[in-house]
Structure formats: structure tokens, C-alpha cells
């Protein structure tokens, strides 16, 4: 049953990193508070799921011109334009903000649209996503006195 916790966190993190509305931070905190899981393995599961979700966005970005004007497309033109302008100004280093609410997911999509190379994309996104989860875990553990 313990494995289900890691798998559930992985899935929550994956969905949260895509353009679908979801939140993985609450799942991570809940699993840490339970005390039944390795924090290191929780960080690994959350990071891997979140990076995979961002990779899905990157892949969608590579194909976005086909879908951009469809009504069902999950990113507003305004959010996409804002992310494109930010990415054009700061380049690949803006991916260090891929953890951020509102702009993070569109940034990973725009990275694909603007043909960011895969290896730098994965490296920067992994640093950003791991950093966010590690900080959240540290705050949670500190609040628990562990």
C-alpha cells in the first residue's frame, strides 16, 4: 500500500505540470506529515512526475500551431502571449520559473513552441521542479520539528 502513495504523488505531480488544473503540493505535504514515506523517495516521485508533465507541455508546444486556435485549447491567447514574451526576453533561463503558478506551465509549452533543445529544457525544468518540492518538504519537516 505504501507504493500507492508514491504512485499517487507521481500522478498528481504529472497532472499538475500539464495544462490541466491540479495541485500536487498538498499531496506531498500530506504524505510527509503521515510519516510513513521516505522524504527522498517522495521528492523523487514528485519531481519525476512534474518533469514528465512539463515534457508533455514541451511536446505539445512543438505541435501547437496545429491546435492554437481551437476552442478547446487549454491556454488562453493572452497567457500564451505573455509566456512567449517572457521567454523571448529571458530565454531558456526563464525555465527556472517553470515551478511558478500561472506562468510555469505556459513557459514549458512556449519552450517547445520556440524549439528549445530537449537536454537544456530537461535540466533547467528538473532543477526548478526539484527545488520547489525540496523547499516545501523542508518547510513541512521544520514545522513538524523533524
Image (cartoon, rainbow, N blue to C red):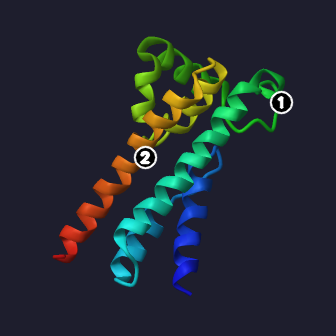
Mark in the foreground, 1 or 2: 2
Q: Nearer the viewer, residue 26 or 120?
A: 120
Please state the horizontal and vertical placement of residue 20, each as a whole percent of the image.
65, 49
Please state the horizontal and vertical placement of residue 56, each as a whole percent of the image.
67, 41
Name the mark on residue 129.
2
Give the CA separation, mark 1 to mark 2: 30 Å
Residue 72 appears in which quarter of the rendering? top right
Q: Nearer the viewer, residue 49 or 109?
A: 49
Element carrying mark 1: loop
Please state the horizontal and vertical placement of residue 78, each as a whole percent of the image.
60, 24
At x 45% / y 60%, what residue is drawn? Answer: 44
**Badge 2, how many Cα within 10 Å: few under 14, some, many 20+?**
many
Residue furthest left in the image: 145
Element carrying mark 2: helix
Q: Nearer the viewer, residue 22 or 118?
A: 118
> Label 1, on which residue?
70
Q: Quadrant of the C terminus?
A: bottom left
At x 47% / y 69%, what residue is drawn? Answer: 27
Dots 1, 2 in contact, CB < 8 A:
no
Amino acid at each position: 500500500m505504501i507504493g500507492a502513495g508514491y504512485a499517487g504523488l507521481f500522478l498528481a505531480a504529472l497532472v499538475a505540470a500539464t495544462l490541466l488544473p491540479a495541485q500536487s503540493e498538498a499531496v506531498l505535504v500530506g504524505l510527509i506529515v503521515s510519516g510513513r514515506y521516505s522524504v527522498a523517495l517522495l521528492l523523487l516521485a514528485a519531481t519525476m512526475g512534474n518533469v514528465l508533465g512539463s515534457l508533455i507541455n514541451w511536446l505539445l508546444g512543438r505541435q501547437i500551431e496545429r491546435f492554437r486556435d481551437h476552442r478547446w485549447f487549454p491556454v488562453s491567447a493572452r497567457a500564451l502571449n505573455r509566456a512567449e514574451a517572457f521567454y523571448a526576453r529571458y530565454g531558456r533561463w526563464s525555465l527556472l520559473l517553470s515551478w511558478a503558478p500561472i506562468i510555469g506551465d505556459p513557459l514549458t509549452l512556449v519552450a517547445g513552441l520556440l524549439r528549445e533543445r530537449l537536454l537544456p529544457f530537461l535540466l533547467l525544468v528538473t532543477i526548478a521542479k526539484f527545488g520547489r518540492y525540496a523547499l516545501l518538504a523542508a518547510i513541512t519537516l521544520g514545522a513538524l520539528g523533524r
